[in-house]
Image (cartoon, rainbow, N blue to C red):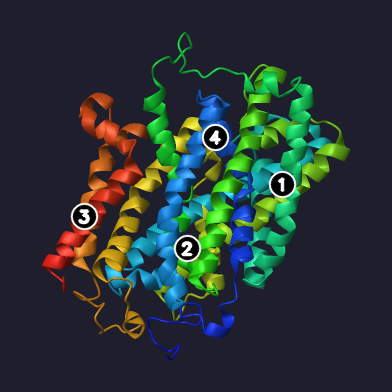
Amino acid sequence: MSVSNPLANADLLPVPAERRTWRVGSYAALWISMSACVPTYMLASSLVGGGMNWWQAILTIFLGNAIVLVPILLNADAGTRYGIPFPVFCRASFGTVGANVPAVLRGLVACGWFGIQAWIGGDALHKILELCYPSMASPAGSGALGITASQFACFLAFWGVNMWVVYRGIDSIRVLLNIKAPLLIALGVAFLVWAHRSAGGFGPMLSQPSAFATGQPHAGQFMAFFIPALTGMVGFWATLSLNIPDFSRYAASQRDQVLGQALGLPLAMAFYAFIGVAVTSATAVIFGKTIWDPIEVLVHFRNPAVLVPAMVAVCVATLATNIAANVVSPANDFSNLAPRWISFRTGGLITGLLGIAMMPWKLVADPSGYIFTWLVGYSALLGPIGGIMIADYFAYRRRVLDVAALYDASGCYRYTGGWSLAAVAAFVLSVLPNLPGFLVQVGCLAPSAVPSLLLALYGYAWFAGFAIAFVVYLVLRKLFPLL
């Protein structure tokens, strides 16, 4: 297959058999490395900040990851079987041109995550500088963006390091991941030990009552918080549940990718989530308030010998996670738009620029916005895409794809001018029911203007979108196989 094909370049072509060398350990290490990150800590501790006690938060996270593991493994099958990346896999269900819709949507979400991780790394750099220049800690210089000039400069500096790694190429990612995992896990364990000692043991630390218990401020409101929180937990890895073929295409066998991912994802997320929950619970005992941002917790350690190594570890770990989870896939997604002109490096640069434009510091400004606006909001888009892809590959095609046709603009996946109208219709019909709830969440509509059923449905955004898209697509595809 020629790389001069307008639907192909070297990064989009199937991985040859000799390069499919990833085993069980590779996939377990991948998920352990990606799970041990600051957003995982923030995810867990934000549930405590929202009112859950420690075991409710851990259970919610475990259930969410057990659920999202299913579409991850299902979509990974095609990558391993055929060696194709996510944007090429999408062509079977959305068409050779229409595949750009899910690819770009998934890529845009990755840009948001890229920005969040770059902001976290830049914030860690800023905290280091505050030790030398205490005046930088003053919020007086906050401008129109809502952050100070020095914060923005540190954000851009860390962003620049990310872009440099992208320029060096994808092979540098493995080196970073090998360094990153032990660094952040060691930092997390050190956090846990400090919290245990400072809070007077695990008893005081984990005895904070649920805000939803009888006699507490939000008594009787647990399910109203739990359902959208669970959706948010699924949404946390909803991006990877789509583009996992970008990684599974390197697997030596289906057994390797299935077993490696099943061992790596739920356990790693639960372990690091426990660290986040336990330390956040401890801050309520130690400082009299819950602090859900680990960098803010680190600021309380004024000793440079403690703070600087910890912040450096955060920077290195965040850099590794960002490149692996938030650059590889969107770079491929944007490359799919114009394979002849957009390479992996160019796609990575586009990702970085859009990450700045999304102002990530606002996405993680508070626990409510992080979960209910960001995570649940984009899950309303990604759930339907997953439903369509899985319905097409497993229920309709029975795992049989014509690989050559995936790279043929006039082949069987051309549908209507390169667009699968069945997939587009299923996507639109499954997104629309969640739109009113999202508009209420971001303040564009008053709750009284939306039927209560649609308001409640938004809490199930990923589940509802996935189910509706799965059924509608399958019906349309069977009735109109060429549509």
Mark 2 to mark 4 CA distance (whole Å): 24 Å
Q: Residues within 10 Å of mark 4 (few under 14, many from 20)?
A: many
**Mark 4 or mark 1: whose residue is earlier in sequence:** 4
Q: Residues within 10 Å of mark 3 (few under 14, many from 20)?
A: some
Residue highlighted by disc 1 = 185
Viewer-nearest residue: 102 or 263:
263
Residue highlighted by disc 3 = 471
From this view, report whether residue 77 is shown above or below residue 131.
below
Q: Secondary structure at mark 4?
A: helix
Q: Residues within 10 Å of mark 2 (few under 14, many from 20)?
A: many
Residue 137 x %, y %: 73, 32
Could you tell whether 115 is left or right of 312 in the image?
left
Please identify, in this view, whether the residue under mark 4 or under mark 1 is nearer the observer. 4
Q: Secondary structure at mark 3?
A: helix
In the picture as drawn, the residue positioned furthest to the top comes out as 215
**Mark 2 or mark 4: whose residue is earlier in sequence:** 4
Q: Which residue is painted at 41% across and 27% down in the image?
A: 225
Could you tell whether 231 is left or right of 160 in the image?
left
